[in-house]
Amino acid sequence: MTTAAQAPAQVIRVAVIVGSTRPDRRGPRFVRWLMAQLDGRDDLGVDLVDLDDLDLPARLPAADDPRAVELTRHVAEADAFIVVTPEYNHGYPASLKQAIDVPYQEWNAKPVAFVSYGGASGGIRAVEQLRQVFAELHAVTIRDGVAFAGPQVGSDGTAGDADRCAAAAKVMLDELVWWALALRDARRVRPYHA
C-alpha cells in the first residue's frame, strides 16, 4: 500500500472513511484490520479520513467552514471510498450522514465499498441504507463488502476468521479497483455532471 501522497497516476486513491465518532467506538479495530488487508496492495493509495478527527458540527456547516473544506478536499481527491460503519439501532451513525451530506458533486461517478460491523447482522442493514444515500449522490456502490457480526475483530485488528475475512476483503478490493479505474477513465473522457 502506498499513501495517497505517494500514489502514481495509475494507483487508485481510496479514502477510508471511519464513520463512528462515539467515545467507546470499535471502528478503529476494524480500520486496523482493513489497513492490514490494504498493506500488500500496490494498486491502492490510502487516505484515512476519521470523522472523529474532523469534528464536524452537529448542524450542517457552511461551505467555507475549515472542517467542511477539509472533508470536501478528501472526497474530491479520492478515486474511490471504503466506508467503515457500525450499525446503530438498525441504521448508520448520524456523524456519517453529516459527512456524506457536506460534499455533493465530489462523490459523483465514484465507487464506494463497505466494511460494516455490529449486532447479529454485521451492520448490513446500515449498509443497505447507505446504498440508497450514495445512489442519490450518483456514486456506485460495490456489491461485495465485508460484514462483521459481533466482536469478530480484536483490539489489535486481528479477525477471528482471518482467512474468510481476508478472502472477502480481496473480492471487495478487486471490485473497487475495477470500478474506480473504469469510472476514472470515463470521467477523463467525458466529465460527469449530475
Image (cartoon, rainbow, N blue to C red):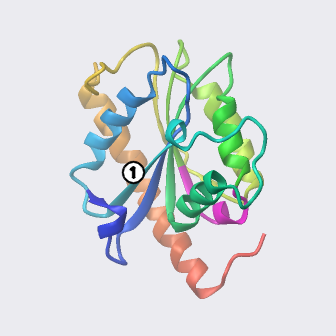
Residue at horizontal 25 percent and vertical 27 percent from the top: 162
Quadrant assignment, res 189: bottom right
Which residue appears farthest toward the bottom when viewing the image?
189
Answer above or below: position of 25 versus 133.
Answer: above
Q: Where is residue 56 shown, x and y percent of the image? A: 64, 41
Which residue appears farthest toward the left when viewing the image?
40
Residue at horizontal 68 percent and vertical 19 percent from the top: 90
Answer above or below: position of 27 versus 173.
Answer: above
Q: Identify the image quadrant of the C terminus.
A: bottom right
Q: Where is residue 3 shown, x and y percent of the image? A: 31, 60
Q: Secondary structure at mark 1?
A: helix
- Residue 70 is a magenta residue: no
Residue 64 is left or right of residue 42, and the answer is right
Please state which amino acid type lies under the numbered disc 1. Leu
Q: Identify the image quadrant of the N terminus.
A: bottom left
The residue at which mark 1 appears reads as 173
Q: Where is residue 108 shown, x and y percent of the image? A: 67, 64
Q: Which residues are magenta?
A: 103-112
7 or 194, nearer to the observer: 7
| Crowd around label 1: few <14 · some 14–19 · many ≥20 (10 Å) | many
Residue 102 is left or right of residue 10, and the answer is right
Q: Where is residue 165 shown, x and y percent of the image? A: 33, 31
Quadrant assignment, res 88: top right
62 or 73, nearer to the observer: 62
Quadrant assignment, res 30: top left
68 or 135, nearer to the observer: 68
Answer above or below: position of 172 versus 94.
Answer: below
Residue at horizontal 58 percent and vertical 78 percent from the top: 186
Residue 117 is left or right of residue 10, and the answer is right
Residue at horizontal 71 percent and vertical 65 percent from the top: 105
